[in-house]
Image: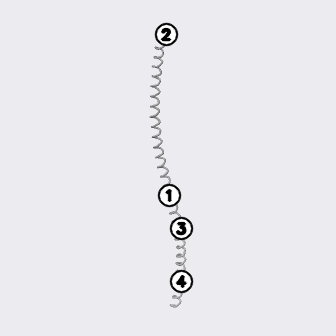
């Protein structure tokens, strides 16, 4: 009987140790679950930020494209204006020559 009581006492102590280990494991699992939840929350926030950055990048690419198109248009306008100025300069030079010719003719008529 004493041996059975000793065995029972040893088993009771073993059960207490196992129950304590089990409680520790449950606490660890709860801690891990909280950590996992925090990580998933952070992941969700990072994915949201990534989506915002991708949207900003797409907007920036559109703005760059629009600016490139405006630049090309402005360059074409500048080129057209340069050509127009050349034509006007040429016409102006022709008119100056005509005025000089008319002035000489007038001078010749008056003399």
Answer with the quarter of the image where residue 94 lies: bottom right
Task: Return the disc, 2 or 3, that comes first in the chain's sequence.
Answer: 2
Nearest the eye: 106 or 35: 35
Label 1's element?
Answer: helix
Task: Return the disc, 3 or 4, that comes first in the chain's sequence.
Answer: 3
Nearest-to-viewer mark from 2 and 4? 2
Residue of label 2: 3
Q: Residues within 10 Å of mark 4 (few under 14, many from 20)?
A: few
The answer for how far apart the CA atoms under marks 1 and 2 are is 86 Å
Residue of label 3: 76
Label 4's element?
Answer: helix
Residue of label 1: 62
Nearest the eye: 56 or 87: 56
Nearest-to-viewer mark from 3 and 4? 3
Residue 41 x/y as whole percent: 45, 40
Residue of label 4: 98
Task: Return the disc, 2 or 4, that comes first in the chain's sequence.
Answer: 2
């Amino acid at each position: 009987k004493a041996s059975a009581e000793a065995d029972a006492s040893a088993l009771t102590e073993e059960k207490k140790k196992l129950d304590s280990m089990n409680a520790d494991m449950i606490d660890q699992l709860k801690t891990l679950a909280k950590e996992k939840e925090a990580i998933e929350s952070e992941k969700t926030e990072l994915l949201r930020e990534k989506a915002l950055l991708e949207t900003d990048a797409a907007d920036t690419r559109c703005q760059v494209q629009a600016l490139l198109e405006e630049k090309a248009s402005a360059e074409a306008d500048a080129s057209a204006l340069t050509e127009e100025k050349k034509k006007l300069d040429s016409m102006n030079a022709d008119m100056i020559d005509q005025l000089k010719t008319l002035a000489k003719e007038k001078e010749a008529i008056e003399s």
